[in-house]
Amino acid sequence: MKRLLGVMGDPIAHSVSPAIHTAAIEALGLDYEYLPFRVTPERVGDAVRGMRALDIRGMNVTVPHKERVIEFLDKLTPRSEATGSVNTIINDNGVLIGDTTDGEGFLRDFEMIFGPVRGKRALLLGAGGAARSVAYSLAAAGCGITIVNRTSEKAESIKSMLRRSFDDIFVEIGYNISDSVNNSDFVINTTSVGMIHPEETPLEGSYLRKDLGVYDIIYNPPRTRLMREAESVGAATANGLGMLVNQAALSFVSWTGKRPPLELMFEAASIALF
Ligand code: ATR
């Protein structure tokens, strides 16, 4: 009998997760089916409890429920506990475990492109939910972090979370953007600036330099203004498609115990998106 997997969010129609996971399920010939579920905020509890009743093996959780689902789960992994975010639920014989693979998915893609982050410094633009997960995984891997955000309380909150989670890390709030960029090896955009309005950028191009690695977690559009301006000074860039695929792959392993084919997942994501 087929086992069920899915993703819950609101809206969900444009999620590319079903395409990514279905490509992996088919390539490996597994007896699973992955479905999108539109779940409105007031139904999150019902939906999560329904996983036990319907024996749904796993669920991805996306906007706007990543924090809200937590109260309905039995256990959290340390990284979910620390970041206060769940993107993956694993149903272990009725015990629902919350995990987040966003940060680790980011880190795997990032290190594949830019090399090991241990001992390096990253400038994180933004301090929302995605930034929390990215910051946690960077810090866990030994990367120093400078956070710059429009709302400084949210940057402070990430800084405190990192200090609680890790003994020996460098983390600061950046108040002078020029110094913050100059002291960094990488710039990572976790804000939504440049997504809806492609003419906008979270960082003025004049701050960019050739030896920076610039990662934008936005994947649509695939080349943001930040990336274009970074490329024009000779800097290496990457968009967030690899993070999307890698977070999916990590969830997939948790549910099925099988390593999925990343290349095929990339292809499926690209086809679904563009
Ligand atoms: P996500 O889950 O994708 O991280 P989020 O939690 O809403 O989404 O966070 C969005 C991030 O983009 C925040 O850091 C937000 O800044 P604030 O904390 O000040 O709200 C940032 N952001 C969104 N629009 C922005 C804008 N126009 N200028 C600067 N920062 C912006």
Image (cartoon, helix red, strand yellow):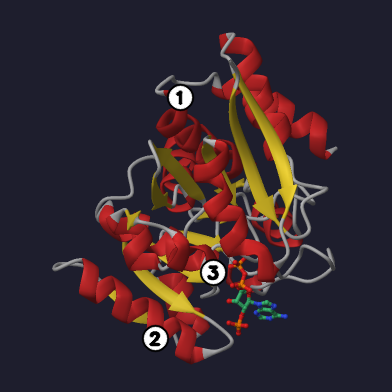
Residue 55 picture location, percent across and down: 52, 35
The type of residue carrying mark 2 is Glu
Quadrant in the picture for the N terminus: top right
Residue drawn at x 49%, y 47% as measured from the top left? 88
Nearer the N terminus, badge 1 or badge 2?
2
Nearer the N terminus, badge 3 or badge 2?
3
Front tag of 3 and 2: 3
Front tag of 1 and 2: 1
Which of 58/115 is in front? Answer: 58
Which of 59/233 is in front? Answer: 59
Tag 3 residue = 68
> For residue 218, what is the image quadrant?
bottom right
Residue 200 picture location, percent across and down: 79, 71
Image side of residue 90 versus residue 45, left or right: left
The reply to whether residue 165 is in sight is yes
Residue drawn at x 44%, y 71% as measured from the top left? 182
Residue 119 picture location, percent across and down: 24, 55
Tag 1 residue = 256
> For residue 59, what is the image quadrant?
top right
How far apart marks 3 and 2 lie (CA) works out to 22 Å
Confirm or deny contact between disc 3 and disc 2 (CB under 8 A): no
Which of 106/101 is in front? Answer: 101
Residue 177 is tagged as none
Tag 2 residue = 156
